[in-house]
Each structure stands twice: as C-alpha cells, then as structure tokens.
Image: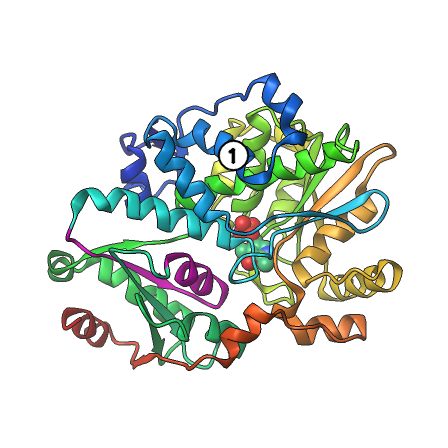
Amino acid sequence: MRYYSTNKKARPATLEEAVVNGLAPDRGLYMPERIEKLPKEFFDAIDTMPFQDIACVVADAFFGEDIEKAELESIVRDTLSFDCPVVEVTGDIFSLELFHGPTLAFKDVGARFMARLLRHFISAKRGQTVNVLVATSGDTGSAVANGFLGVDGIHVYVLYPKGKVSKIQESQFTTLGRNITAIEVDGAFDDCQALVKNAFMDAELNRRMYLTSANSINVARFLPQAFYYFNAYARMKERGLADRLVVCVPSGNFGNITAGLFAREMGLPVERFIAANNANDVFYEYLATGEYNPRPSIQTIANAMDVGAPSNFARIYDLYGGDHARITSIVAGATYTDAQIREAMGECHAKTGYTLDPHGACGYRALAEGLRPGETGVFLETAHPAKFKDTVEDAIKASVDIPERLAKFMSGKKQSVGLSKEFADFKAFLMQE
Ligand SMILES: *Cc1c(COP(=O)(O)O)cnc(C)c1O
C-alpha cells in the first residue's frame, strides 16, 4: 500500500517511510491510497468474534500487503493486551471504555501498535538502535514511553517541561528506566518541542544516531484506532442495539474520530458521528459555517482536547474531498464549557452511578442532548477518571479510586535528567549517549 500526502506535493511513500518519517516532506499528513471495504460475511459474524480477532481482520485490510500475516497478527495481539469493553450507562447511552491499557487512556492502542511496527521495520536493519524523540505536555509522553518500554532496538527520550506536568503524569514516564530516558527541561512545552525539532534538523546528530518521532499524526498511531470502533459495533450488535448506532468522540486533534470515519468507509454500519469539543471548538464552527479558522488553544478541564488547530482536519477534509455538505451529513458537532462538563460528570454520576472523566463527559453530554428517537449512542471514554482525580471528585462529590496500575507508577522512583532549554546542552547529552 502506498501513502499519499494530504498536501499532494510529496511523492507517495511506502508504509515504512510513512511510519519512520511521520510527516510527509511537504508537511502534509499521510493517507492510505485505498480504503478497503470489508465483506458482508465479516459484519454478519462480527458479534461472535472477540476484539482481537476483529482487530486482525481490520489490520489486514490496511497493512496486509506490507507485513506478513503471522507477524501482523502477533503485532496486533501483542498491542491489544487489554480489552476495550462497552458498558451500559443509561438505556440508550453506552460507554466504549478505552482506559484499560497501561497508561489508562486510548493513546495506548496507537502507541503500542506503532512501537511494534517500528521494531518490525528495524529488525531488518539489525544492530542500529532507533532513537525516538518525543516532547510532551503530559499524556503523550506516558503513552509513547509505555508503548515502547522493553521493545528491543528502540530507545525513547521523553522531553517534558519541569514543574508543568502533574505528578501522576510525570510518574508514568519517569519511573520506567530500561530503554526510556526522561529529560526534564527547564522551560515550557514549546521549548521541549523546539529541542526535538532542532535535533531532527541537526546534520551532525543525525549522522551519529538514527532519530525518529512518535507524533500522534503518524499513520501507525492513527489507523489502529479503527480497531475499537469495530469492537463497539460488535458488542452493540450482540445486545441487539446496533441498527441505528451513533458514535460520539471527544475530540482535540481529531485523530481518534478520523479513525472512526475510516472504519465507516470500510463499511462499518455507523449511522452518524458526533464530534464533542470543549471550548476549543473550531471544528464545531466549521460544521456550522463551512469556514475553518484555527486559533490559539485555551486551557480547559478536558485538557487533552485543548487544541486550537487540529492536525487531522486535513485528513477529514481530504477523505470527503472537501465537501462540506457531505461532512455535515456524517458528522455533527457539540461544544461545552468547563461548567457544562462539570455538570455532565455530576449529573451522570447522580443518575446512573457511572463516573466519567472530563473528556468522556463531553461525549456523554452530546449523546444525552443529541440522540434522535430510535438511535442508540456509544461515546468513547478516552481516559480513566482517576487521571483527573481532583477535578472529577469535585464534580461528582464522591471519591474516585486509583487503579492499582496507576498507583504503581506513583510509588516508583523518579529517574530523570535535568537539562536547560538550550539546544547545545541537549545535543551534547545525546552525543555522549
Ligand atoms: C488525546 C486525547 C483526546 C483527543 O483525541 P484526538 O485524537 O486528539 O481528537 C481525548 N481525550 C483524551 C483523554 C486524550 O488523551
């Protein structure tokens, strides 16, 4: 399979090039040149299939031409070492729980898959370590570090701004050791990002070591997210509730919902999607007006969705040939203030006993307000509420238990390297590694 750039100026790439480079040379996002429709027999039997088996079929449609079948299956099964169950919240609203992985957020799926795919590609170039550089404001670092933890031939450097990520988040990438190095930068997130960018542009450094990124726009992180949309449908079909399915996705950079739209193009019978936003709602505006005006992000309590210029807008636009009417016929929008998000967490907990995190709360509320008669809704619960313990407890007036795997990170010993925000320091550190 070839991958073309949404900017259409770069030449099409192989899967390996798309995965190793992340972004196309013309700064566009890679798209698979074909989206295969899955056969009717697959959908007829899907409710009898376990999640991992379903994911193998979906993975084969994207990656089957480029990776040998048994190897691909083992990558998929190894990635999905945890379930993505569908849980009833009210009679017609269900939660697709994506927080059962190692770092308790959906990004585990893409990060784990990408790590294993990268290992597959580099095992051909034996002997050379691939160094993954990632700048994080919190959640990406933990998903990438844990996704790559213990993967042979790969070393991960996580750069994070000193004092600007929560203790829980910090513990998820500074306590791992092994092939993960945490670098605490005396600066802001933007400084971390600048250090990574400069490293990729530094000729001397690139001669010395093989560098790559694990950015969320990477096709190997984005496409595997389609797996759990098929599982949501299967588990709803099992309940006899899949006839008019609406899937609601709390969205920031729009990678997650784009994977859902790809699933629909593969034939997944989802009636429509809802993209739920916090106050960063440029996509909501686009749906309403046809005009896309990115702007700087503002801080909210659903902070993983604080994105003012969602990268994957380019993929959605390309997927539907820029046809606004077509896009609005498939995707609706919703937007919520922090007060409304808190209200949704409180109301849902009081009415049903289900504890939402601030991101899932946007999804829940959009379904509670937006479902039409006869429709059944599934929202993506993108993170475990304990990751946002204080905010959630304050909203639901009850305590939130910390799962054991999260507590374990918090009791680990912090190991990090302190560096200034000067590129010369970072470069010197990498050169002596
Ligand atoms: C990253 C993230 C989102 C946003 O997902 P996108 O793919 O960027 O739209 C939503 N919720 C949580 C918890 C996240 O970590």
Q: Horizontally, is 227 left or right of 326 in the view? A: left
Q: Horizontally, is 357 left or right of 27 in the view? A: right
The vertical placement of 198 against 233, above or below, is below
Category of crowding for the residue at label 1, using alpha-carbon neighbours closer than 10 angstroms: few (below 14), some (14–19), many (at least 20): some
Please give the name of the residue rendered at 28% of the width and 34% of the height, measured from the top-left corner: 10
The local secondary structure at tag 1 comes to: helix
Name the quarter where the N terminus is drawn. top left
Q: Nearer the viewer, residue 374 or 224?
A: 224
Q: Kindly identify which residue carries mark 1.
A: 317
Q: Which quarter of the picture shows residue 352? A: bottom right
Please give the name of the residue rendered at 80% of the width and 43% of the height, measured from the top-left corner: 370
Q: Is residue 308 among what the camera can see?
A: no
Does ligand 1 reach within 8 Å of label 1's beta carbon?
A: no
Q: Is residue 89 among what the camera can see?
A: yes
391 in the magenta segment: no
Q: Which quarter of the picture shows residue 11? A: top left
x and y percent of residue 330 in the render? 66, 31
Name the quarter where the C terminus is drawn. bottom left
The vertical placement of 152 against 417, above or below, is above
Which contiguous range is marked in magenta? 127-148
Please give the name of the residue rendered at 37% of the width and 33% of the height, measured from the top-left corner: 70
Quadrant of the displayed image that contains ligand 1? bottom right
x and y percent of residue 167 in the render? 52, 79
The vertical placement of 388 against 228, above or below, is below
Q: Horizontally, is 352 left or right of 57 in the view? A: right
Amino acid type at image mark 1: Tyr
Q: Horizontally, is 228 left or right of 115 in the view? A: right
